[in-house]
Amino acid sequence: MASVFTVSQVTSYIKNMFTQDFALNRISIRGEVSNCKYHSSGHIYFTLKDGGAQIAAVMFAGQRNGLSFRLEEGQEVVVKGTVDVYERDGRYQLYAKEIAREGRGDLFARFEALRNELEEMGMFDACYKRPIPRYARRIGIVTAGTGAAIRDIMNIAARRNPYVQLVLYPALVQGEQAQYSIAKGIETLDKLGLDVLIVGRGGGSIEDLWAFNEERVARAIFNCSTPVISAVGHETDVTIADYVADLRAPTPSAAAELAVFDYRQFKEQIELYRNVLERSARRRIEKTRFMLEQCRMRLKLKDPARQINEKRQRLADLEQALDWQMRNALDEERSRLDDDRSVLVRLIQMAAAEQKHRLALAATRLEGLSPLKKLGGGYGFIQDERGKGLRSVTQVKEGETIRIYAADGRIDGMVKQIEHTEEREG
């Protein structure tokens, strides 16, 4: 019976054969870089290929000084290193020590040519970029129906906002018919009036992602009236779709984060705003209430009834004071008048006594000059017929009537003769 070997024994035997082969220990291989990934540890994993075959390659972090540029998809390079067997997986791979650029691959050249052409046409211009709705409720997704991308988007959407509606168009994302399927999916979902579209797929090599570098897909995105988020491959993968789309997401998961707003965070923010608004409203109400109380107090002080009462009280006080002053003034005036009246009475009495005395003197004189008294002494008083007293003989003529008054009566007579008495010199 033939010998039976374990898998480890066979793999170890093959590894020894690779190790003993001088050509495989120091070999330079030319090829196009594909499926390039920079690991967080610093290692670089990529595939080196040509038109007929491909080989897995890795450059460890300790060998990075043998790389003077950033390794990217589509680059034509010459890799110096060792071909050896990775025993755990039972496959061989190229362990790179130095990498030099040889030129550009065919796919990368096609990528750059189409990118430059579309850029000259203005399809990448920022003026055509539309803002992504902040609160999208219906989101369309153009991707494979059974891939990691759609599962990631659904999980993130369910976690962030279970009320968002996801509309999937299961498209081919790899192969010759993929470009037609993706473009058709964009055009179909655009007619549904959705809020935003996510177009993309998970990571892969440049060949796997090439459908998103086709002009047909680029024009479908550009002509779409719904805002489009491009989410193709990993963060380091860049496609034509990324340039044309309104927003580029590094991964489908990131696209879901950008398209679906966090409902829980939204509720927390609304609650925060509500609390802030309530506090602000309470402060405003308290301030307004305080101002209202101040106004009420001022109004109370300026109340017409209160002012009328105050004026009335003030008027009563003034009336009482005026009455007191008037009484006091009247008393003072009455006292002064009493004093003046006493003085006046005394003056009047004195004046009356003086006048009485003067009247007595005048009466005495008048009595001395009284015709009646004269008549009583034997004299008479003569008047003409007109009643005018006669003091001279020249005042009458002979034959005129005269009246002679005596002490006990009157005598009427007629002038018979007038005799003038000569005046004697003294």
Image: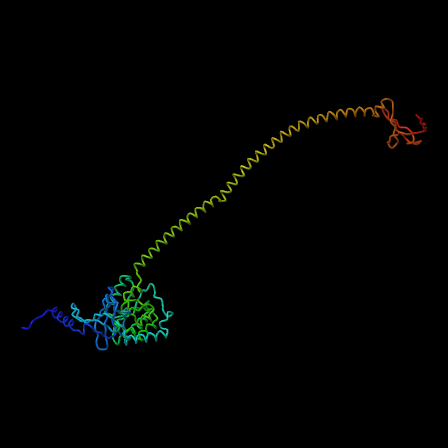
Q: From the viewer's perspective, is 236 left or right of 301? A: left
For the C terminus, the image quarter is top right
- Extreme-bottom residue of the structure: 52
Q: To which quarter of the image does residue 248 belong? A: bottom left
Image position, residue 267 (x, y; %): 31, 58
Who is closer to the viewer here, 164 or 177?
177
Q: From the viewer's perspective, is 401 left or right of 190? A: right
Image position, residue 226 (x, y; %): 34, 69
Q: To which quarter of the image does residue 150 belong? A: bottom left
Who is closer to the viewer here, 392 or 45?
45
How are the colours assigned in the image? rainbow
Image position, residue 10 (x, y; %): 12, 70
Total marks shown come to 0
Residue beneath the point at 33% across and 55% down = 272
Q: To which quarter of the image does residue 404 belong? A: top right
Who is closer to the viewer here, 205 or 261?
205
For the N terminus, the image quarter is bottom left
Q: Vertical placement of 180 versus 162: above or below?
A: below
Image position, residue 268 (x, y; %): 31, 57
Q: From the viewer's perspective, is 179 left or right of 289? A: left
Q: From the viewer's perspective, is 421 left or right of 163? A: right
- Extreme-top residue of the structure: 377
